Image (cartoon, helix red, strand yellow):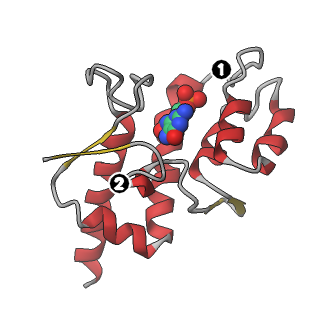
Amino acid sequence: MTIYFYKVWEPYGCFSNFSPHGIEIRGTYWSTVEHYYQAQKFVGSVDAAIIPSIYAAETPEQAAALGRCSTRQLRSDWDAVKTQVMKEAVLKKFLTHAEIRDTLLATGDNLLVENSPNDYFWGCGADKTGENCLGKILMNVREEIRNLLCRYQ
Ligand SMILES: Nc1nc(O)c(N)c(N[C@@H]2O[C@H](COP(=O)(O)O)[C@@H](O)[C@H]2O)n1
């Protein structure tokens, strides 16, 4: 079975990076994975001054709008590092929040797909041919957490 998720208020909304599950990474607490991910785009770039505004954005939608502004310059290695940045944040989210960790583990070996109509990298896109990198990260995190639990039980 394939489990599709996208918006926070839809089924499996806790798999969205916009879900209200904060993470602490290297001593800083971020309100959502999306806040953290969008801010990382500008680390070391000439537009790094935007990071505090992304950090303080009231909603993940606002954080994403700031991070997606096409006139700002992304860090030069963004394409090379973005998947690892996302993986670290998503893993931290599911290690931190037990209730959503249980939801993730309860999906067993089902395929997880971010059903984004316009994102062919993180999601599957409108025609379902996208790379689904967020779904792949979630399945990878699921496997990693399962292995961790086996080791410590
Ligand atoms: N617009 C939008 N709304 C949501 O509710 C979403 N879950 C997403 N997808 C997320 O957007 C992020 C990618 O942003 P960039 O295009 O790289 O700026 C990523 O977290 C997707 O999961 N989009």
Q: Residue furthest right?
A: 49
- SS state under label 2: loop
Secondary structure beneath label 1: loop
The residue indicated by pointer 1 is: 76
For the point 43% across and 75% down, which residue is it? Answer: 98
Q: Residue at x 31, y 62 (%)?
A: 104
- The CA span between labels 1 and 2 is 36 Å
Residue 46: which quarter of the image?
Answer: top right
Q: Position of residue 36 (x, y in %)?
A: 64, 47
**Which residue in the structure is indicated by mark 2?**
11
The three-letter code of the residue at mark 2 reads Pro
**Amino acid type at mark 1:** Ser
Q: Quadrant of the C terminus?
A: bottom left
- Where does the image place residue 51, in percent across and percent down from the top left? 79, 40
Q: Residue furthest bottom?
A: 153
In the rendering, which numbered label is found on residue 24?
Answer: none
- Local packing at callout 1 (Cα closer than 10 Å; few below 14, some 14-19, many 20+) is few
